[in-house]
């Protein structure tokens, strides 16, 4: 297929020849050398036109290739930016997870420290209707001693309650510890020591929840020790001091049997 340059050249040549022939036929003025000169001149102009056209096409092709290269480079840059953006997004998400994990571990660690510190902090407790503040070790030792009593090991119970009272002489658990110690001694028929500790409870806290039971238990010890007179007096004192208690009801019944 003919290129645009060849077509332009051919059309220009034909046009020039026609014009030249028409001029020669009509006028007959040019001689051969002038005709050749005119033809050469025409050829030069056609060649110049062709060269200019080819140069224009070449520049257009170069421009087009340059544009394609620029577009390809731009696309590569866009792809690179997308890749880097994806990486940054991934790093950001990982960083967020790491931060959340660190915060969670810090919270767990702080909670663990608080829990450990709380184990050494005094706490408010309620025993036998009385509220007081106790050290963790104090609470633990009292509950351990009471567990021994509840198992029925009364000799061992006496040992642990005596040890508790020595280690914590001012403890709020003291009156209750005296009550259970005296009961353990009663169970092992150590009635004299049992009465001593029941009386120590009453002297220490006369309005203690266990005080009426302690007085009744003293009377029981006196009965076991063959002291009915002392038992009757103790029961009378119980009825007068704690008339509304269940122990007072039991005391009246026992008084009727002692007479």
Image (cartoon, grey):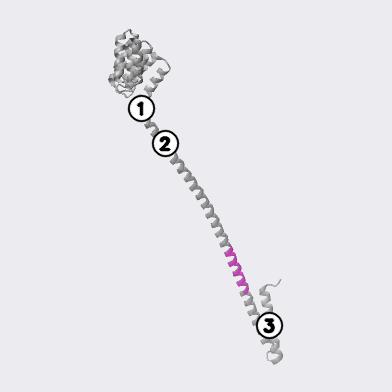
The quadrant where residue 146 appears: top left
Tell which residue pokes out farthest to the top in this image: 226
Tell me where residue 229 appears, x and y as whole percent.
Answer: 29, 9
Task: Return the residue nearer the eye: 93 or 3.
Answer: 93
Q: Is residue 66 magenta?
A: yes
Q: Marks 1 and 2: CB-CB under 8 Å?
A: no
Q: Is residue 179 visible?
A: no
Residue at the spot x=46%, y=41% of the render? 101
Q: Is residue 108 magenta?
A: no
Residue under numbered circle 3: 15
Tell me where residue 88 appears, x and y as whole percent.
Answer: 50, 50
Counting other residues with Cα less than 10 Å from the Cα at mark 3, is it few (<14), some (14-19), or many (20 or more)? Answer: few
First-in-chain label (2 vs 3): 3
Task: Return the residue nearer the eye: 11 or 115.
Answer: 115
* Image: 36 above or below 200: below
Residue at the spot x=30%, y=15% of the render? 236
Counting other residues with Cα less than 10 Å from the Cα at mark 1, is it few (<14), some (14-19), or many (20 or more)? Answer: few
The quadrant where residue 186 appears: top left
* Image: 173 above or below 52: above
Q: CA distance from mark 1 to mark 2?
A: 31 Å
Side of 196 where 115 appears, left or right: right
Tell me where residue 257 appears, x and y as whole percent.
Answer: 35, 11
Q: Which SS type dominates the magenta stretch?
A: helix
Numbered mark located on residue 109 in the image: 2
Q: Which residues are magenta?
A: 53-68
Judged from the image, the secondary structure of the residue bearing numbered disc 1 is strand
Numbered disc in front, either 1 or 3: 1
Q: Give the quarter of the figure containing the N terminus.
A: bottom right
Residue under numbered circle 1: 126
Q: Is residue 222 visible?
A: yes
First-in-chain label (1 vs 3): 3
């Amino acid at each position: 297929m003919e290129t645009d340059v060849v077509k332009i050249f051919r059309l220009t040549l034909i046009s020039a020849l026609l014009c030249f022939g028409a001029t020669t036929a009509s006028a007959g003025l040019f001689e051969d050398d002038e005709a050749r000169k005119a033809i050469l001149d025409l050829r030069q102009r056609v060649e110049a036109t062709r060269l200019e056209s080819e140069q224009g096409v070449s520049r257009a092709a170069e421009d087009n290739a340059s544009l394609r290269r620029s577009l390809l480079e731009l696309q590569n840059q866009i792809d690179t930016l997308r890749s880097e953006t994806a990486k940054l997004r991934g790093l950001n998400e990982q960083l967020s997870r790491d931060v959340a994990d660190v915060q969670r571990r810090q919270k767990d660690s702080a909670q663990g420290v608080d829990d450990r510190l709380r184990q050494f902090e005094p706490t408010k407790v309620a025993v036998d209707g009385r509220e007081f503040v106790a050290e963790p070790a104090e609470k633990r030792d009292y509950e351990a001693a009471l567990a021994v009593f509840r198992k029925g090991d009364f000799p061992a119970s006496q040992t642990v309650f005596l040890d508790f009272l020595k280690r914590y002489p001012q403890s709020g658990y003291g009156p209750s510890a005296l009550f259970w110690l005296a009961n353990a001694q009663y169970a092992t028929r150590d009635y004299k020591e049992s009465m001593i500790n029941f009386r120590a409870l009453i002297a220490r806290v006369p309005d203690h929840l266990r005080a009426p039971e302690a007085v009744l238990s003293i009377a029981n010890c006196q009965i076991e020790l063959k002291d009915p007179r002392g038992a009757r007096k103790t029961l009378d004192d119980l009825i007068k001091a704690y008339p509304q208690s269940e122990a007072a009801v039991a005391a009246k019944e026992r008084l009727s049997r002692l007479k």
